[in-house]
Every structure is written in structure tokens, then in C-alpha cells.
Amino acid sequence: MHTYLVPITRAFRQNANAANAAGAEAYLLNQFTFFGLKTPGRRRLCREHYRQYPVSGLTELEAIVRECFALPQREYQYFAIELFAWHKKQWNASVIGLMEECLVTKSWWDSVDHIASEWLNDYFRLYPENIGTVTGKWNRSANIWLQRSSILFQKKFRKDTDTELLTRYILHCSRSKEFFIQKAIGWALREYSKTDPEWVSRFVQQHPLPALSIREAIKRIERE
């Protein structure tokens, strides 16, 4: 184990809770094991660790993230996602390779959506010239988690959302039978409805979409 992870591993073990772990494992369909830390407590421990133990550079940072994604307990993946975001000042354009690697490693909605929120939004704002090449490849991929990420990476862009790109990516995936793709389409549209509800309403009316995507897309519009 990388020496950087020894103190946080000790903290995870000291605060482990078997009942919480069993519940978390069942919630994610028993695909992963857990120490059983609740999110607020885990984040507090992790932030204390980030402050106390600086990372020497990007090479070490990427090595730590990769090791966390190889370890069995899910808390290590959450730790890695938040650690990498904590050190975003060290990022360069090439870190998209690691980001993609993590998107397709031990993939499930919890890690993929966490990466979208913590990494992709900031990365593509820093390096907008990479949006078309990278997310276009993801959208055309056979990997549903890369497709999902191509649809969701703009969910925090608000008025800066490229609606032409969003339209193209949604329509390319609109016939998918995958629950997580249909859900992503609806979520992306619902988020953009906070900025331009009229655009979302027109989009839903003009394009054939799965029923699940439509329900998710117009939730906020209907409430208002």
C-alpha cells in the first residue's frame, strides 16, 4: 500500500461500522465492499487527511488515485475522487486519461456521477478545446458509463451549456434501452431546465425520447 494511504486506512478501520457497511453494500447491489462510514464523517476524515498530508506532485497524485481504484472498499474510490479534486491546481490537460480510466474502473452510478461532478465540470472548463474530441469519443463508445458521462459533463455549465452538443449527444443515445442512459438524458435536461425551461420543453416536444427520460426532464418544469 502507498504510504500516503496508511493513515486514512487506519482512520477508516477505526470508524468502520458493520451495519452501515451491510446497508451500503445492499444499496449498490452487493457489487462492492464497504468500511461502513457515513458520508459526512468520511468526508471530515478525508479532508483532515488532505490538509495534513500534502501530495508532492501530479505523478504521485495519479499513482495514489490508481491504487485507490484497485482497493476493494468503496470508500477508497470516494477518497480518490475527492483527493484528485482537492488538488485540481496540479492538473494538466493529460489528466483526462486518468479520468477516463477511473470512469471505466469499478463503474457504477455512484462513482461515475461523482467524477462528473468533481472532475469533469472543472476539467472541461479548464480545457474546453478537448470537449469535442474527448466527449465525442465517449458518446460514440459502447461503454454506457462513458456515454452517460458525455451527456452529464455539462450539468453544471448552466448558461454556458452547449445545447447543440447536448442535443447531438442525447439523440445519439435516445434509443438506448439502458436505464442509466435514459436516466442521464432526463437528468441533464432537468438540470438545464433551471437555466432555460422553455428550451427543455421544446426539446421534449420535438424529439422522441424514452418515457423515463421525459419524466425526469420535466419534473422541475411541472412543479413550477
Image (cartoon, rainbow, N blue to C red):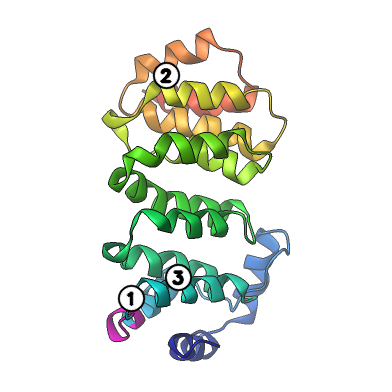
- Let me know if residue 3 is in the magenta part: no
**Residue range of the region highlighted in magenta in the rendering:** 49-55
CA gap, disc 2 to disc 3?
A: 38 Å
Sequence-earlier tag: 2 or 1: 1
**Figure quadrant of residue 193:** top left
Q: Amino acid at mark 1?
A: Gly
Q: Position of residue 73 (x, y in %)?
A: 61, 75
Whether residue 93 is situated above or below residue 31 in the rendered picture? above
Labels 2 and 1 touching (C-beta < 8 A):
no
Toward which corner of the image does residue 192 lie, by quadrant? top left
Can you tell which quarter of the image residue 82 is in?
bottom left
- The residue wearing badge 2 is 200
Residues 71 and 39: in front is 71
Residue 150 placed where, x, y %?
51, 38
Q: As drawn, is 148 to the left or to the right of 72?
A: left
The residue depicted at 30 percent of the width and 27 percent of the height is 195
Q: CA distance from mark 1 to mark 3?
A: 9 Å
As helix, strand or loop, the secondary structure at mark 2 comes to helix
User: Can residue 48 be seen here?
Assistant: yes
Q: Residues within 10 Å of mark 2 (few under 14, many from 20)?
A: many
Q: Quadrant of the N terminus?
A: bottom right
Residue that label 3 marks:
62
Disc 2 vs disc 1: which is toward the camera? 1
Find out whether the residues at labels 2 and 3 contact each other: C-beta distance under 8 Å: no
Query: Which residue shows up at 45% across the image and 53% down it?
Result: 96
Q: Is residue 51 magenta?
A: yes
Mark 2: amino acid: Val
- Quickly name the residue at label 1: 57
- Circle on res. 221: none
